[in-house]
Image (cartoon, helix red, strand yellow):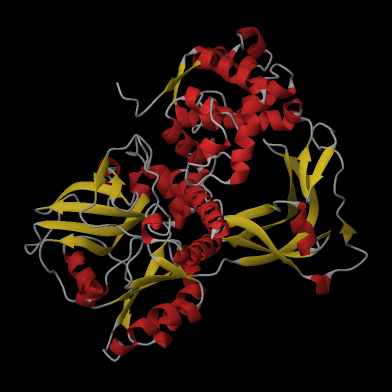
Amino acid sequence: MIKVNKLIHKLREKINICNYKYYVLNKPAITDQQYDLLLLKLEKLERYIPLEKKQKSPTQNINDSLLKHYKQIAHKTPMLSLQNTFNSQFLYKQFICLYKKYINYKNFFCCELKFDGVAINLLYINGHLIHGLTRGNGYIGEDITHNISLIKDIPIKLKGNNIPQTLEVRGEIFITKKNFYYINQNFLMQKKKFCNTRSAVVGLLRMRNINNYANLLSFFCYGVGFANRNIACYHTTLLKQCKTYGLPISSNIISCTTLQEIIQFYDFFKTNRHKLSYDIDGIVIKINDIFLQKQIGCNSRAPKWAIAYKFPSQEKSTILKQIFFQTGRTGIITPIAYFKSIKISGVKICYATLYNINEIYRLDLKIGDIITIQRCGNVIPKIIHVVKSKRTKQHSNKIIIPQFCPSCNAKIINNNNLLYCSASFSCKAQFKEYLKHFISRNAINIKYVGKQLIYRLVEKNIISNVMDLFALNKKQLRLLNLGETTIQKILLSLYAKHKVYLHNFLFALGIKNMGIVTSKNIADHFVTLENFLKTDKYHLLKINGIGLKTISYICSFLKKKDNIQYINLLRQKIDIIYLNITQ
């Protein structure tokens, strides 16, 4: 049982990190399929533990990471997620079979497209838009009313005479492929480009001034969360009624009875989705009868009367040109596969991360191989397999695993095929990545100091530790040929007394395995930095979601006098904001 509990804690921590990266940072860490497999594994393990111990589990909750700078408002009814599947067998066994006794009824199911955007909740009182919320954690959403009220497809006032006094509308904000291309080619040219349409929607919705760009976003209504009176008996009829209120709905909605009809709808759009003006990542199947929906009900995460049947990721073949080895912030050396560029879902791809050398051995990779690339979840490029039937001795070369760090030439430590640079921050690659981490939004959030400036400062040996960053002067910055206005902004930002929350400060320390979610859990537990610095393994074990490896790294970090001295120096430049302290 102890082993099961450890596995549960480890999986919960991993899923929570994935949730944070997906919902808050808008940077998916893994594919949808990988995420669903993790969740399924956790659900199976949690069968052996009491119900009260599941309450804070990601199997029982939707994303729990709300953005603090937005006002938060409760939904009238929970805005739940959808259970997913990627294969027809699961769809049949886990969904359709449950309702076999009802399937004799004609048009029992409703099939819709699954848009690749952001779910939104609109509250109308007496036909007037009161607020628009994101899904948030399913029960409380972020108030983005101002931004969504500027989207042309979302009516500020509903039309018609038969409108419920209180109406909570559910729908999806998305961006067309044409507008997505426009964003990445025009006004965002100088910034990091959005990797997919969903990330573009999130980015625009979080802008403080969306006025000039709101017309790039679109909206479809896909349901009603709450109405003070019955609108329709069937979901398909409900959507048509919403259309009469002025709420746009997709034209690609059908009602059907059999699995065969569902598969036909799925297969058609899997083949023809490229012809749509917007991105979809599957279809959604719902029970059409609204009274039956209410009878069947929901669990804490998802309605039992609906399921998303998702498309598999797209694949293409290309030639592996080279494997580069890249040193990261914690010293881990990661192999990067560089291949002849290909386009998947309209996105040009020429490299993929291989995570560690075990992946090279597993795939039996050789330079010159024909490889199959999959853009998992339309986001992450991944090598799926090698086409060995096309391998020739003449064109295939063995990959040489380095013995020395590609950045600083220090000896590489091989720990069970995980490669580490032994030089710590005397390795420029590690130090650059750490500084990039330190100045990031989730850490100290230093403005006007970006990745390129960090790289140049380190390469020219102007800074060799974090405190050098705070001691920068005009003479040093002029060596980089920066303008006087830019120099002034950088120095004002660096010399200002930075105020950060404890969890951001802890995250900035860069302790191995201690991500933003773990940092938040630790900050909530210890409340002050002094309490954290006095901690030990016994106290850390009391915090939910922290694995033994992470605890080991934290204890090892706190035992080193240099690290404590570093923290004390940082406190001279940074004010830590403490929450939950009784006055």
Residue under the image location 61 percent in, 9 percent down: 473
The percent coordinates of residue 404 (x first, y second) are 85, 38
Q: Nearer the viewer, residue 142 or 137?
A: 137
On screen, residue 169 versus residue 142, left or right, reads: left
Image quarter in which the C terminus is found: top left
Q: Is residue 531 above or below residue 248?
A: above
Residue under the image location 43 percent in, 43 percent down: 203
Residue under the image location 66 percent in, 58 percent down: 382
Total labels: the figure holds: 0
The percent coordinates of residue 426 (x first, y second) are 76, 25
Image quarter in which the N terminus is found: bottom right
Residue with the most extreme right position: 394
Q: Nearer the viewer, residue 348 or 292?
A: 292
The percent coordinates of residue 371 (x first, y second) are 74, 64
Residue under the image location 40 percent in, 43 percent down: 204
Q: Quadrant of residue 24?
A: top left
Q: Nearer the viewer, residue 166 or 269?
A: 166
The percent coordinates of residue 349 (x first, y second) are 65, 54
Q: Is residue 528 above or below residue 394?
A: above
Residue with the most extreme bottom position: 104
On screen, residue 540 versus residue 74, left or right, reads: right
Q: Nearer the viewer, residue 10 or 471?
A: 10
Q: Is residue 93 above or below residue 156?
A: below
Residue 61 visible? The answer is no
On screen, residue 386 versus residue 119, left or right, reads: right
